[in-house]
Image (spheres, rainbow, N blue to C red):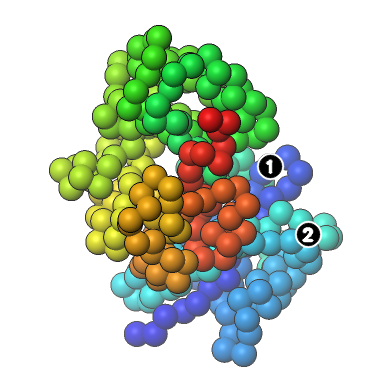
Amino acid sequence: MGTVRVAVAVIYNEQGEVLIQQRAVDTHQGGLWEFPGGKIEADETLEQALEREIREELDIDVVSSRPLITISHDYGDRHVSLEVYRVTEWHGQVQSMEQQPLHWVLPDRLKDYHMPAADKPIVSAINLSSSYIITPSIIKEPLVILEQLQALLGAGESMFLYRVKSLAGISHEAMQQEILELCNSNRAALLVHEKNRSTVKAHGVHLTEAGLQAYREKNDTDGLLSVSCHSAQSLQKAESINADFAMLSPVEKTQSHPDTKPLGWKNFKDIVNDVNIPVFALGGMTAEHKEKAWSHGAQGVAGISSWWQL
């Protein structure tokens, strides 16, 4: 059984909604909602197929797009590879050229629609930021960090990991509560490292690679679940427990672990291509690495020093 390569578009409007369409009842996965797109022909590039399919289905022209995620899925009767692009700029007026019902949906409401199993990781990727910002491990001046956090939130950052080894002048619980309130006020997500868990109800928990090995399976009460991974095996394990996303590191050489051999971008891409969950690149990353990270299959970048004035 060969693999059917499919170009998929996550199309945004000015209100931040994404477009979904309903499959015809008499087709494979009929009646379910999906993202627009179609089969990549043998003589086409991914970009050419994306532009053609969107023009044929919706009568619009893609102006600006970038990679979001690649999904490999076996339905039993067929195997598909969904190569998903995020489309943020387009020309024309959207209309269904194939008479399929269309809906514009806010990203956090996509879970209310019945979609093919292969689309679930796409929904996860849509609802995640392109930056996963980790707190400094040593915090001597909590108020300074809170001020910097407010500035980051004001600049549009929306996903943070509380990972603190040493904290002065305040308890971990109190600091997490302060950060959580700021995040809630700005529609941002806060995850807490497994070694920093407290009574504060954050938006999720983050596991180390060691913690991953002892973890059975994510349940709905956990909130978001992210995992630190350093190998293909641990990333596959993260996928098997239904983690929402992972960090893979180190991609490049880091000051914190100068003797650790980096993966490099080629190895990073090869490892990420074997799983169906969003993966952040970690290790030597700055915001300027996003384009490169996207082109190598990443959800985005994660890091510490590039985002904080330490």
Which residue occupies 42% across, 15% down? 175
Q: Is residue 106 above or below residue 269?
A: above
The residue lying toward the viewer, choosing from 38 and 198, is 198
Residue 173 percent location from the top left of the image: 35, 14
Q: Secondary structure at mark 1?
A: loop
**Which mark, residue 90?**
2
Q: Compared with residue 109, is residue 103 higher up or lower down, i.e. above or below?
A: below
Residue drawn at the location 62% of the way across and 59% of the way down: 291
Residue 9 in percent (x, y) is at: 62, 62
Q: Residues within 10 Å of mark 1 (few under 14, many from 20)?
A: few
Q: Is residue 45 visible?
A: yes
Q: Is residue 215 above or below residue 187?
A: below
User: What is the total number of numbered labels drawn onto the structure image?
Assistant: 2
User: What's the mark number on residue 16?
Assistant: 1
Q: Which mark is residue 165?
A: none
**Label 1 is placed on what type of residue?**
Gly
In the image shown, does 271 or 42 lie closer to the viewer? 271
Q: Position of residue 10 (x, y in %)?
A: 62, 56
180 relative to 265, above or below: above
Amino acid at the residue labelled 2: Trp
